[in-house]
Image (spheres, rainbow, N blue to C red):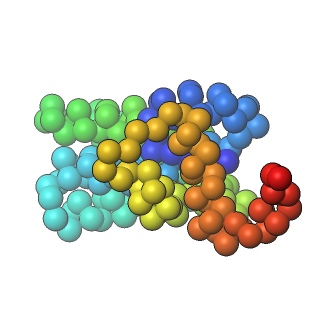
């Protein structure tokens, strides 16, 4: 499984490394940021109308009904006379179209897959950053990977088990 924020580089680079059988998922919260951005452009910041519009879109997205969302957005864009609002709608249409199969949240949840990247982002903040981002540190890719692998062992309480299976050099 590959969970990302929707950036093309993630799917192209990391997805290519993991292989074709990997399930790609756009982080729910990142997708919703785009929905909220469009909603605010249509009805303003903090309005009940914005909240109601976003809630409708969120329910459809949660249930994996991207095609219904796209149809509604296209219909709205066709009716919209204000250029800025039309631009917001077409922007969301483009985003959802580009992500399409990565937004099947109903199927992902049915398979027990995570749809939010909060755990990974938390691990980066609490496991990676304290060890790797100290003042003056510089890392080669090999050194960084080696250090992070050991840090992950230590932080997941698997340090002793790992090293007990490796004989010490004489």
Residue 37's x, y, as percent? 26, 49
The residue under the point 71% across, 40% down is 22
Quarter of the image holding residue 161?
A: bottom right
The reply, left or right, for residue 105 in relation to residue 89 is right
The answer to which of 115 and 170 lies nearer the viewer is 170
Residue 109's x, y, as percent? 64, 62
Residue 79, can we see it? no
The residue under the point 66% across, 62% down is 153
Residue 34's x, y, as percent? 34, 47
The answer to which of 163 and 83 lies nearer the viewer is 163
User: Please, which residue is most extreme toward the front here?
Assistant: 170
Quarter of the image holding residue 58?
A: bottom left
Residue 72's x, y, as percent? 40, 44
Residue 144, can we see it? yes
The residue under the point 20% across, 53% down is 40
The residue under the point 16% across, 65% down is 47
Badge count: 0
The reply, left or right, for residue 99 in relation to residue 33 is right
């Amino acid at each position: 499984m590959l969970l990302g924020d929707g950036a093309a580089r993630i799917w192209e680079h990391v997805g290519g490394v993991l292989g074709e059988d990997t399930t790609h998922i756009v982080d729910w919260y990142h997708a919703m940021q785009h929905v909220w951005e469009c909603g605010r452009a249509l009805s303003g910041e903090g309005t009940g109308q914005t909240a109601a519009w976003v809630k409708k879109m969120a329910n459809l997205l949660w249930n994996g009904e991207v095609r219904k969302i796209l149809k509604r957005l296209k219909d709205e864009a066709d009716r919209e006379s204000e250029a800025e609002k039309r631009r917001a709608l077409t922007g969301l249409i483009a985003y959802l179209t580009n992500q399409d199969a990565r937004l099947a949240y109903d199927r992902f949840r049915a398979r027990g897959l995570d749809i939010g990247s909060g755990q990974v982002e938390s691990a980066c903040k609490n496991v990676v950053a304290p060890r790797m981002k100290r003042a003056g540190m510089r890392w080669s890719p090999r050194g960084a990977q080696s250090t992070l692998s050991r840090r992950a062992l230590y932080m997941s309480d698997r340090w002793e088990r790992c090293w007990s299976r490796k004989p010490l050099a004489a």
